[in-house]
Amino acid sequence: MQASRARLFKEYKEVQREKSADPDIQLVCDDSNIFKWNALIKGPSETPFEGGVFQLAFSVPEQYPLQPPQVRFLTKIFHPNVHFKTGEICLDILKNAWSPAWTLQSVCRAIIALMAHPEPDSPLNCDSGNLLRSGDIRGYQSMARMYTRLAAMPKKG
C-alpha cells in the first residue's frame, strides 16, 4: 500500500507539472483519497466525439501499479467498447495487458485512442458493435454524435 501511495503521489506531481502539456486530458485527484481520481478528456478530432468532454472515474487498487485501475465513463457515450449503462470500458490494458509502466495519464491517452478506433469484435455495447460490424458506419457515427451532443457538450443559453 505504501508503494502504491508513493507512486500515486509521484503521478500527482507529474500531472500538476505537465497540466499544459496535454490539453486533451485534465486529471484530478480526490482531495481526501489518493486512490480516487477523475479525468475530463476531450473527444478526439475527426470522430463523432469531437467537441465533447467526457468524464472518467478512476478507482485505483491498493496493489497499484501491479494491478490496473478500474476506469469507467461517467458521461454517457455510444461506443462499442463502453457499457452504455455502467460506463465500464473494455480495453486490454485495463485487464490482461496491464503493465506497471502505464500511468493514469497514459491510460487516458489509450482511452482517447480507443474512442477514435473502436473494436467492434469485443463489444460491451452490442447495438453500437452491431452497427459497425454490419458496415453501417453512418448509423454508428450518427448515434455517437447524437449522444455526444446530449451528454458531453456544454448546454448553450
Image (cartoon, grey):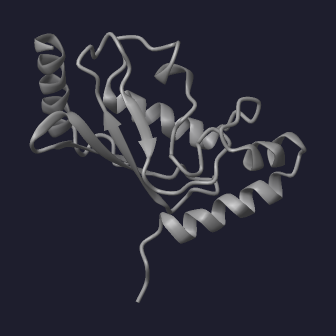
Percent position of residue 126, x then y: 74, 43
User: Which quadrant holds residue 63?
Assistant: top left
Percent position of residue 148, x then y: 56, 63
User: Which quadrant holds residue 77?
Assistant: bottom right
The relative height of residue 69 versus residue 53 in the rendered view (above or below) is above
The relative height of residue 93 versus residue 150 in the rendered view (above or below) is above
- Residue lying farthest to the bottom in this orientation: 157
Q: Residue at x 53, y 36 (%)?
A: 89
**Residue 26, can we see it?**
no
**Residue 10, can we see it?**
yes
Judged left or right of residue 90, residue 53 is: left
Q: How many marks?
A: 0
- Residue lying farthest to the right in this orientation: 134
- Residue lying farthest to the front in this orientation: 85
Judged left or right of residue 137, residue 147 is: left
The relative height of residue 132 versus residue 48 in the rendered view (above or below) is above
Percent position of residue 85, x then y: 56, 51
Quadrant of the rendering where the C terminus is positioned: bottom left
User: Which quadrant holds residue 3?
Assistant: top left
Q: Residue at x 82, y 58 (%)?
A: 138
Quadrant of the rendering where the N terminus is positioned: top left
The relative height of residue 155 versus residue 106 in the rendered view (above or below) is below
Percent position of residue 35, x then y: 21, 31
Q: Residue at x 12, y 31 (%)?
A: 13
Judged left or right of residue 49, residue 93 is: left
